[in-house]
Amino acid sequence: MAMALAASAAATPTYATAATLAGPGGDYAICLKGRGTKAMEACDRAIGLDYYRGGDLAALHRSRSLLHETYSETDAAIADADAAIRLEPDDASAYAMRGHLWQVMKVYDRAIADFSAAIRLRPDDADFYKDRGSIWFDSAKTDQAIADFDAAIRLAPDNASAHESRARAWKDKHDLDRAIADYSEAIRLDPTNAVTVYWRGRTFDDKGDRDRAIADFGMAIKLAPESELYLFNRGAALIDKHEPLRAIADFDAVLTHTPDNAKALYYRGVQKRVTGNAEGALNDIAEATRIDPDWVAAQTTH
């Protein structure tokens, strides 16, 4: 009898005790924290143990799915999301998790189906509508995207991201006034978001309102002073405003970060020619041609 008990104890993993499994140092807790390879290993052990059931096991699969996504292991992430949904078919968050993964893989019909399931289960969640709207937008279904962004904003009118997303959709439909209105509301709600400010500037530029475009690029640069994109676009807008010296200064700043930026070199060279600096213009355009001859040739043939 004693021998039988000893054999049984030896066959049971030492980490299978309830305290270790559920405690702060156990595999379950480490897995749910979801950070790094240690968490992945903990998830593998906890799931492989065949100890957890129902919602606890679903939580482990959801956590491991997120870890797989972190490591760009999308197929494995989807497999874990599938398992979580089988275990808890009424969990809206699991459908949303899998929907994001399908979106990453550009399998838009499955992504839409999963977010639609999430919305059926939790119809008052503004983020689900916003996220489904982004998938409609990615799949070039702009009207459906706007309808979902409308729903998200009705549910959460102070959601800056939903306004920014709808602005992108209006811009895609060339309804620039509505796009600007939504970008402006998003900026009011989150004035520190340089990306939103930049895109409002691009929209003003599309309207031909160079002054407001330049002002927004300037605001975006203040928020993200290292951004070459914002500096370059302000330089381009200044060219349209016939302000070569200010444009050259922006291209100088771009080239400080990336000296081999052929477009910035070329445009700076053209502006130097406008100011009468013929030698500087030749040098810049020659260097741009050396770096990207095909692109420069395409500009000179227009």
Image (cartoon, helix red, strand yellow):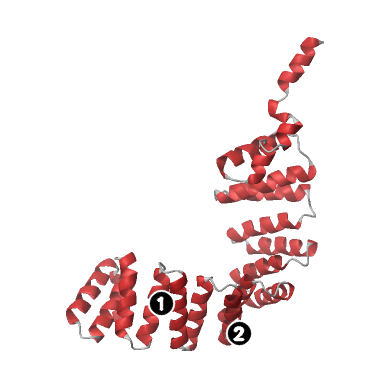
* Residue at disc 1, secondary structure: helix
Q: How many marks?
A: 2
- 121 vs 53: above or below: below
Is residue 49 positioned above or below 189 on the image?
above
Q: Tell me the amino acid under the disc marked 2.
A: Arg
Question: Within 10 angstroms of label 1, few (less than 14), some, or many (20 or more) residues?
Answer: many
- Indicate whether 98 appears above or below 53: below
Can you identify the residue that label 1 sits on? 233
Q: Which quarter of the picture shows residue 37?
A: top right
Q: Please report the residue visible at 53 percent of the width from the left and 70 percent of the height from the top.
A: 193
Q: Residue furthest left?
A: 279
Q: CA distance from mark 1 to mark 2?
A: 22 Å
- Tell me if residue 301 can be seen: no
| 265 left or right, relative to 178 | left
The percent position of residue 162, horizontal first and vertical second, equals 64, 72
Q: What numbered label is drawn on residue 71?
A: none
Q: Is residue 260 left or right of residue 214?
A: left
Image quarter where the C terminus lies is bottom left
Quadrant in which the N terminus is drawn? top right
Secondary structure of the residue carrying tag 2 is helix
Task: Say which of 105 and 61 sits in front.
Answer: 61
Picture quarter containing residue 23?
top right
Residue 210 coordinates in the image, percent (x, y): 44, 87
Residue at 39% x, 74% y is 231
Mark with earlier residue (1, 2): 2
Q: Give the amino acid type for the residue marked by disc 1 in the picture.
A: Asn
- Residue 178: which disc? 2
Q: Is residue 60 left or right of residue 301?
A: right
